[in-house]
Image (cartoon, grey):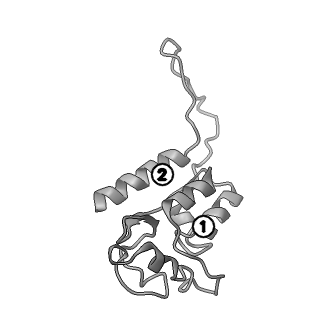
Amino acid sequence: MKKFSFLLSLILLVACAAPAPTIAPSAPAPTIAPSAPRKPFVVAHRGGAALAPENTLAAFANAIKLGVDMVECDVHLSKDGQVVVMHDPDVSRTTDGRGQIGDLTLAELKALNAAAKFPGGYAAQTVPTLAELLDLVK
């Protein structure tokens, strides 16, 4: 299960990354002048968990609005085989529910508030599916 989660996270990272420039095989390798400033690569970990409830569509939408280079997420399979976005295999740390994701159906996961434990109060958020996240970041 961990391999599957890692693999899907890696696929999402690649899918969300800006396309790399292509260099013809015969072209010389590009050089960077020593004085050229380098821009940091900004990744919104769990969608920017310090700014919005982690691994929710609200967090990912906020990260996109802020102009990050990439969003990172974690995925798990629900009892009925749906790929959902959540860091922990247990829902109790971030939602108002209890139990393992693999023991809950998508309908049961969708009934949970994924923003329930976010400090300072936040509008209710459902547990997103990977498909919903991919639709958002297109």
Tell me which residue sits at (48%, 15%) in the image. Answer: 25
Closest to the observer, 65 or 27: 65
- Corner quadrant of residue 121: bottom right
Q: Nearer the viewer, residue 109 or 115?
A: 109
Would you name the residue on which mark 1 appears?
57
What's the residue at 36%, 52% (across, down)?
7
Residue 61 occupies which quadrant of the picture?
bottom right
Q: Residues within 10 Å of mark 1 (few under 14, many from 20)?
A: many
- Residue 28, image x, y percentages: 52, 15
30 relative position to 109: left or right: right
What residue is drawn where x is 39% and y is 73%?
88
Q: Which residue is mark 2?
A: 12
Query: In which quadrant of the rendered view does residue 137 lie?
Result: bottom right
Label 2 Cα crowd, 10 Å radius (few <14 / some 14-19 / many 20+): many
Q: CA distance from mark 2 to mark 1?
A: 14 Å
Q: Amino acid at mark 1?
A: Leu
Give left or right: position of 88 versus 59: left
Image position, residue 50 (x, y; %): 58, 73
